[in-house]
Image (cartoon, grey):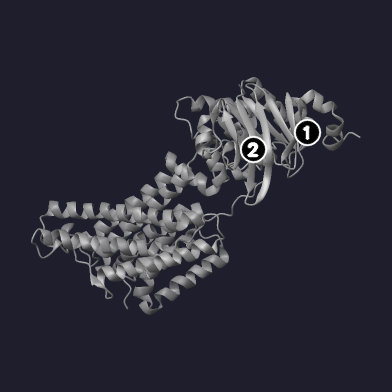
């Protein structure tokens, strides 16, 4: 049984039919990527999983349990963490407070240890624990968004466009960290426009176009796929 | 008028006490604005109903005991009555505010801004009419509960003409701890942090595991409870209850919240004290008829030079 499984999702924004029957699954320990152009439905898929949007049709299960009609705050508690598109850190809270908010759904005593772990993963944040989130650079905000999501100790980490707007060196750093987080045992569903980087770290990938999945294969096969090369990797 | 140091201190005391009451109401405006970006125009009238409920309590309970007034009650019972009234007014106004949010505002949360704003004005009219039917059209006397003892000259034996009565002390004892307590709650507690997070980014707060409906309800509860306490303090201090008192005082409190930087909790408290002091100094040293003009002229001046208010900050740009 897949850790996270979505079957035939149909999600709407008002009257706009954004997801037209998306099915995907993520196995324990994997990095799976969703690639596709702007407006293909990548973010909508993540928001449907985290409960910010509710699909009108279809099911989502986490370790066999239906989550598709649950409110987002309950889904977090079940083990889905999200670093949303645009980072969405709390601008008038310090780095430390932002990380504490990430652990809001938890009641156990090892939150401090997890904060240490996150600060080890992102040493840049360690130097800035008392700085307000809104004063960080874009790359630091992305690190904070990922760190904050990790503070929930998610079973599945949803990452939405972590490379957006970052300098190439920072993109490298973020992707190295994503692999590191995965190696430490967190399953990752990664949404990216930077298909080249995403397919390098992922095991499998789904290609989305206008609300439907047009391709699903291993990352290695997708890299060799002529359509993917042409449309997403810039290879003629 | 001869300006003496004693007169200055007297006016200062009056300004601070009135300012504390305005600050309590202002906190409700700023809390709600901070979290749902709504100017809750009904808030001043929730405060008014707090005064009305308090008035009912402090007249009804003594009459049950066969007394002509609360001041005839034995001191321990009187203290219990004041405390009980305070708690009841806070609970009543808090729950009233929660109910208003639940039934009038929640469904409009994602509607265009004007819809909840007009709804708030509508709720305000409804509450004013409730007050009108409850206590009538004329201002009603709010009885003095405590003996009129001047603490400075009478009890401490100071050689001064400044009066600071038991009543003044009681009003300060009700208002200031609540103002300080709210700051601590918002800064230090888990729920306070959930309120701040929801105010800064509602969607991000949800994916942290924060129940935003609950957090918004809590915000209305706190704002309403503070308005209830302010309602009792206002009645005690000014010896008056009037169905229309929520308009002027609500406007002052809203002004205080804007002056301090709307959404900023410390700013609202600061703005309350600034307006209380301004009004007191204008009343005594200028002309009470001009006081509202003075208060709003200063507000405009502050906003011209600091559009975000005294403590308001420009929201940090997302990089």
Q: Residue at x 36, y 77 (%)?
A: B288
* Secondary structure type for disc 1: helix
Residue A121 percent coordinates (x, y): 63, 26
Residue A198 percent coordinates (x, y): 75, 30
Which image quarter holds the C terminus of chain A?
Answer: top right
Label 1 to label 2: alpha-carbon separation: 23 Å
Query: How would you rate the neighbour count of disc 2 (Cα within 10 Å): few for under 14, some for 14-19, many for 20 or more?
Result: many
Q: Is residue B202 left or right of B173 when viewed as pictured?
A: right
Query: Considering depth in this image, is B257 or A106 the residue closer to the camera?
Result: A106
Quadrant of residue B249 in the image?
A: bottom left
Residue B222 percent coordinates (x, y): 38, 51
Q: Is residue B319 above or below residue A50?
A: below
Specify the label residue A9 is tagged with: 2
* Secondary structure type for disc 2: strand
Q: Residue at x 83, y 33 (%)?
A: A228
Quadrant of residue B82 in the image?
A: bottom left
Visible residue check, residue A32: yes
Between disc 1 and disc 2, whose residue precedes?
Answer: 2
Visible residue check, residue A127: no
Specify the label residue A195 is tagged with: 1
Chain assignment, label 1: A
Of circles 1 and 2, the one toward us is 2
Q: Is residue A190 left or right of B26 when viewed as pictured?
A: right
Query: How would you rate the neighbour count of disc 1 (Cα within 10 Å): few for under 14, some for 14-19, many for 20 or more?
Result: many
Q: Is residue A132 left or right of B104 when viewed as pictured?
A: right
Q: Is residue B106 above or below residue A148?
A: below
């Amino acid at each position: 049984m897949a850790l996270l499984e979505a079957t035939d999702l149909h999600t709407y924004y008002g009257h706009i039919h954004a997801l037209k029957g998306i099915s995907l699954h993520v196995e324990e320990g994997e990095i799976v990527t969703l690639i596709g152009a702007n407006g293909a439905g990548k973010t909508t898929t993540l928001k449907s999983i985290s409960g910010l949007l509710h699909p009108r049709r279809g099911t989502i299960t986490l370790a066999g349990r239906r989550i598709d009609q649950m409110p987002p705050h309950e889904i977090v508690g079940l083990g889905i963490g999200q670093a949303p598109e645009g980072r969405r850190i709390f601008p008038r809270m310090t780095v430390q407070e932002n990380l504490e908010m990430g652990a809001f759904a938890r009641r156990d005593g090892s939150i401090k240890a997890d904060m240490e772990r996150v600060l080890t993963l992102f040493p840049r944040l360690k130097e800035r624990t008392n700085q307000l989130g809104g004063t960080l650079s874009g790359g630091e905000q992305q690190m904070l968004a990922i760190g904050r999501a990790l503070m929930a100790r998610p079973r599945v980490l949803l990452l939405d466009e972590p490379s957006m707007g970052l300098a190439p060196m920072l993109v490298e750093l973020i992707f190295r960290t994503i692999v590191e987080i995965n190696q430490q045992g967190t399953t990752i569903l990664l949404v990216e426009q930077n298909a080249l980087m995403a397919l390098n770290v992922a095991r499998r990938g789904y290609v989305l176009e206008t609300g439907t999945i047009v391709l699903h294969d291993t990352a290695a096969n997708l890299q060799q796929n002529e359509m993917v090369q042409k449309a997403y990797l810039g290879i003629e | 008028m001869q300006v003496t140091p004693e007169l200055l201190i007297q006016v200062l005391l009056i300004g601070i006490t009135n300012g504390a009451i305005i600050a309590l109401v202002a906190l409700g405006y700023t809390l709600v604005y901070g979290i749902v970006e709504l100017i809750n125009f009904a808030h001043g009238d929730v405060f008014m109903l707090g005064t009305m409920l308090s008035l009912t309590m402090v007249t009804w309970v003594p009459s049950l005991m066969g007394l002509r007034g609360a001041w005839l009650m034995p001191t321990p019972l009187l203290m219990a009555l004041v405390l009980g009234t305070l708690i009841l007014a806070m609970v009543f106004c808090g729950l009233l505010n929660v109910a208003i949010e639940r039934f009038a505002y929640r469904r409009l949360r994602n509607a265009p801004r004007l819809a909840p704003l007009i709804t708030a004005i509508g709720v305000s009219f409804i509450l004013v009419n409730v007050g009108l039917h409850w206590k009538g059209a004329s201002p009603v006397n709010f009885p003095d509960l405590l003996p009129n003892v001047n603490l400075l000259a009478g009890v401490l034996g100071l050689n001064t003409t400044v009066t600071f009565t038991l009543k003044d002390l009681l009003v300060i004892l009700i208002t200031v701890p609540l103002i300080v307590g709210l700051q601590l709650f918002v800064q230090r507690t888990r729920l306070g942090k959930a309120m701040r997070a929801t105010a800064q980014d509602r969607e991000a707060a949800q994916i942290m595991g924060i129940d935003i409906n609950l957090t918004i309800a809590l915000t209305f509860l706190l704002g309403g409870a503070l308005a209830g306490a302010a309602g009792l303090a206002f009645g005690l201090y000014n010896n008056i209850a009037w169905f229309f008192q929520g308009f002027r005082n609500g406007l002052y409190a809203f002004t205080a919240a804007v002056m301090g930087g709307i959404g900023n909790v410390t700013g609202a408290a600061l703005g309350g004290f600034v307006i209380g002091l301004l009004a007191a100094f204008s009343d005594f040293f200028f002309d009470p008829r001009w006081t509202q003009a003075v208060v709003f002229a200063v507000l405009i001046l502050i906003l011209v030079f600091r559009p975000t208010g005294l403590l308001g900050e420009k929201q940090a740009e997302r990089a």
